[in-house]
Image: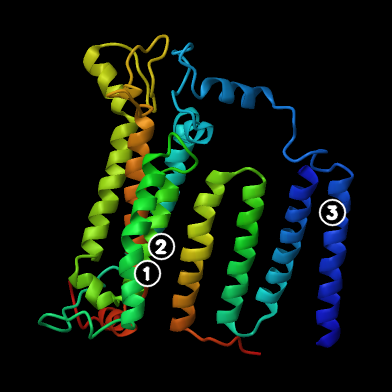
Amino acid sequence: MKYERALIAVAIVVFILVLSYAVTLGAMGSTLPPRDLRLLAKLYLWLAINPWTRNLTVMSPEAVTSIVWDFRGLDTFFETAVLYLAIIGTVAIYRGVYASSKSREGPISEDEVGMSPIAKSVTKITLPIVIAVAVAIALHGHLTPGGGFQGGSTAAVILLLVLVVFSLQYSIRMGITKGSTLALRSAGLLGIAVTSILVLILGLLVGCQSFIFQNQPKAYAPVGVPAFLDGMLVSGTLILFNIFECLAVAAGLTLTFILVLTHEEEIRSVMKGDRHE
Amino acid sequence: MEVLVLTLMAVVALLSTVATYLAITERDLLTAVIYSALQSTAYAIIFYLLMAPDIVLVYIPVAVGLYPAVFIVLIKKSERYEGG
């Protein structure tokens, strides 16, 4: 046993030394990141915001967001679909378990359940701060690093803290239920779906050519979502995608945590068939 | 400046390797989750030094907040100590 652990430690050290030697010899390029940009990267940087090439630009100074939601928007759509299939899987496994507080009638006071008053006070103070940061990350997604997924997962962390600190029972009474989070998540997903075909519908109504995931007007498809709203740069569909993605991610992750935090007894009683929905 | 960044990255990468090794060998799973979060923090610093702020913003809530939370809930529902 002792020799085994020593062997593992030596193997790790040798692996790190070999890897760093290979990197020193130039296995990953001589500088990190490489100084010469490839043609595709040059085009992305040139076209992310370029008011003089209105036919090709995204009108967003954030190159990452313009790649994620415009240049390769369809890829991101399917990435989002994979995440939501995983959440749908969780909901399907826990079907019938409605995480209700029906086991106890009457009002529950805040002091009865959950953690200590110190933890509750700290959570109450940090809740609006973290939600504000999450919303700022999502709404500035087309201007600064960040976006819908980043904002949504930040909001999900504080909602998880609320679920744990104030207890699941109390949170359900306050309206953080399976039904409400599922509805919010579906609203977010519907928003993403509608935004992805928004310009297509617009083009059909006007009677000109247009395509899915179109943002700004193109040479042969002269319709698009305005890049400026009242003099403010909103980058067309990017801000809509970020808002809906933030909503869907925050609600979807909170839904998973509500289901995972449900008491075993409740799940067992549903599995045995004592209770039906 | 570049030497400083590369040195910092090397130190943090080394720290993450140690944390990973401790997370795998630790018998107390709750401590293993904390080692794993330490390794994730090291990765977040590396992503930041590699000039990927978008990845950092998604990596911190997921790897330091949500992922340990899932594991702590699972440990609570199963066993805290690894058998053997």
Q: Position of residue B33 (x, y in %)?
A: 57, 74
Horizontally, residue B8 falls left or right of residue A108, namely right
- What is the chain identity of the residue bearing mark 2? A
Label of residue A231 in the image: none
Which residue is disc 2 drawn over? Answer: A157
The residues bearing labels 1 and 3 have C-alpha atoms spaced at a distance of 40 Å
Q: Residues within 10 Å of mark 2 (few under 14, many from 20)?
A: many
Q: Nearer the viewer, residue A207 or A181?
A: A181
Residue A263 is at least partly visible in this image: no
The residues bearing labels 3 and 2 have C-alpha atoms spaced at a distance of 36 Å
Q: Residues within 10 Å of mark 1 (few under 14, many from 20)?
A: some
- What is the chain identity of the residue bearing mark 3? A
Which residue is disc 1 drawn over? Answer: A161
CB-based contact (under 8 Å), mark 1 and mark 2 = yes
Amino acid found under the numbered disc labelled 2 = Val
Which residue is disc 3 drawn over? Answer: A20
**Quadrant where the image shows the C terminus of chain A:** bottom left
The tag earlier along the polypeptide, 1 or 3, is 3
The residues bearing labels 1 and 2 have C-alpha atoms spaced at a distance of 6 Å
The tag earlier along the polypeptide, 3 or 2, is 3
Q: Nearer the viewer, residue A69 or A92?
A: A69
Amino acid found under the numbered disc labelled 1 = Leu
Q: Position of residue B75 (x, y in %)?
A: 49, 80
Horizontally, residue B48 falls left or right of residue A241, namely right
Residue at 23% across / 54% down in the picture? A183
